[in-house]
Image (tube, grey):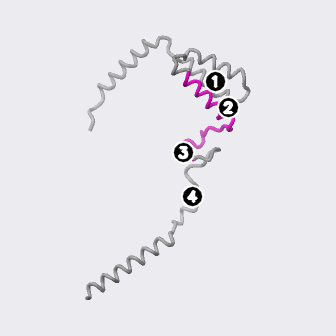
Amino acid sequence: MNISKTLSSTTLALALAGILLTAAPVAPAFAQDQTPVAAPDTAGKPVHRRHRDFAFKATAEERAVLGDLRALTRVYLQSNRASELPALYRSVLAKTDNETVRNVANRMLERAGQAPQNPDLEIARLTRDLNEKLAALPAGQ
């Protein structure tokens, strides 16, 4: 009888402690003084702290234009018409004075101009480099 009385009081004590701990959660005192690690960007989505200073600031209209431009780029690339991309980017530059759109279009134009002159030779070189690096890798653990 003494053992069952001890178990009942222990169970009651544990239940009471559980209720107290869940009823009033206590936040550490330092948590109120800290600023959040990630600050929200203009769209309300959190930005990783490393990228907070470099967050891309664009209006909804600019984002819509850039989304269409990226979608067009993807279609051109998938249909093997990459040679026509510089003309697309130049036409965008001719049609807008918006600084954000012009900056992105200029970067895309630069990237399109950096395509290798002889893709077959570049593919062979990169494949050779890849194979050499794969052979030099240590065995997995």
- Secondary element at tag 4: loop
Q: Taking 34 as reference, is 96 above or below it?
A: above
For marks 4 and 1, give the one nearer the viewer.
Answer: 1
* Alpha-carbon span between mark 2 and mark 4: 34 Å
Q: Name the side, left or right, on which 132 lies relative to 64.
A: left
Asked whether 47 falls inside the magenta stretch, the response is yes
- Secondary element at tag 1: helix
Q: Earlier in the sequence, mark 3 or mark 4?
A: 4
Asked whether 30 falls inside the magenta stretch, the response is no
Q: Taking 43 as reference, is 112 above or below it?
A: above
Give the magenta part as a residue range. Answer: 46-75
Q: Which of marks 2 and 3 is nearer the N terminus?
A: 3
Give residue 30's quadrant in the image: bottom right
Q: What residue type is labelled 4?
A: Gln
Q: Which residue is drawn at 46% across and 13% down?
A: 119
Residue count near mark 1 (Cα–Cα under 10 Å), binned few <14, some 14–19, many ≥20: some
Question: What residue is shown with label 2?
Answer: 100
Q: Which amino acid does label 1 sit on?
A: Asn
Q: Which of marks 3 and 1 is nearer the N terminus?
A: 3
Q: What residue type is labelled 3?
A: His
* Alpha-carbon span between mark 2 and mark 1: 10 Å
- Secondary element at tag 3: loop
Question: What residue is shown with label 1?
Answer: 106
Where residue 50 sits: x, y (%)?
Answer: 54, 43
What kind of secondary structure does the magenta stretch mostly adopt? helix
Question: What residue is shown with label 3?
Answer: 48
For marks 2 and 4, give the one nearer the viewer.
Answer: 2
